[in-house]
Amino acid sequence: MVEVLEGYLRDEGFGVVCAHDGPGAVEAFREHLPDIVVLDLNLPGFPGTEVLRQIRALRDVPIIMLTARVNEVDRVVGLELGADDYVGKPFSPREVVARVKSVLRRGERAEAPPPVGERRVGGLMIDPSSHDVRLEGKSVTLTPTQFRILEVLSANVGQTLTREQLLQRVSADGDVYDRTLDRHIANLRARIEPDPANPRYVLTVFGVGYKMVDPT
Amino acid sequence: MTSNVFHDIRNNLAVAISSIEAFREGILEPSPARLGVVLHALNEIDVLLRKIPREVPASGAPANDLAEH
């Protein structure tokens, strides 16, 4: 099994270090500090969960588990222990390769520094560094508070932010109050929405808050 | 007794399936040693299947003692 996965991963251009039991896995990890670990829970030596724990204690690294125990408890326990993904046995080796790639991609995204450059949502272009906002290429003038709201919403496209979250992030010095938030949103819509009465960018999530969506 | 049988069957199936796939796709050469590993896994499955009680309810109420672990 180790040989098969090693073959597939090498075929994809990955450098691979193999271990055949629990203690060997922890030792190999310590020595090579890999970018990702594919861990079979069915190991001689000591349980795969113990390997998981020891590796996690050494370094925060993505771990994909291979397990023949497919019931829910094991899945939850595995993920609770800090595994990033799992593949149930029997599997196609290609499936494991696909998970490795996907977990590595996810990691790259999470580690990417917060965008400092311009940000695009549909026809809107927002530049946090220059406070420049353009709608379909045309410059839009916003008050500092409106810009701050747009900045926070556009950093969380598709995600509903509660009124509390928005207020907290928008108003550093408590100058935006609950009552005035709706007013600021209305004014923001008047400037960035093609039809402010039927908003396409900044949507109200009734009883919760607001979210920004990409209308395209 | 049967609690780990399915678990062991899946582990052996994983060895057999992924090895054969690797042979078919040219990732590994099907050397006699590697074919021996596949054969061993299949024989293990045969042994494990014999441990399962013969009368398994066809459908409906699952036999709890066969539940996966």
Image (cartoon, coloured by chain):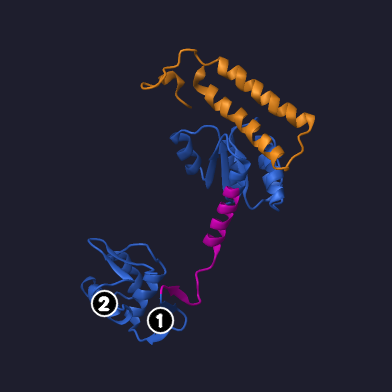
Chain colours: A blue, B orange
Residue A84: image location, x then y, percent: 53, 47
Please give left or right for residue A206 compared with residue A212 in the image.
left
Front in this rendered view, residue A138 or B69: A138
At 50% from the left edge and 75% from the top edge, which residue is drawn? Answer: A116
What type is the residue that disc 2 sits on?
A: Pro
At 53% from the left edge and 42% from the top edge, which residue is drawn? Answer: A86
Marks 1 and 2 sit apart, C-alpha to C-alpha, by 16 Å
Q: Is residue A120 magenta?
A: yes
Residue A28: image location, x then y, percent: 70, 44
The residue stretch that appears in magenta: A98-122
Q: Is residue A59 magenta?
A: no
The residue at the far left in this view is: A179
The label shown at residue A136 is 1
Q: Which subunit holds the residue at mark 1?
A: A
Q: Specify the quadrant of the image occupied by residue B25.
A: top right
Q: Sequence-wise, which precedes: disc 1 or disc 2?
A: 1
Q: Specify the quadrant of the image occupied by residue B7.
A: top right
Compared with A88, A117 (above or below) is below
Q: Residues within 10 Å of mark 2 (few under 14, many from 20)?
A: some
The label shown at residue A196 is 2
Front in this rendered view, residue A175 or A111: A111
Front in this rendered view, residue B59 or A96: B59
Q: Which subunit holds the residue at mark 2?
A: A
> How many numbered discs, if any?
2
Q: Is residue A172 visible?
A: no
Residue A65: image location, x then y, percent: 57, 41
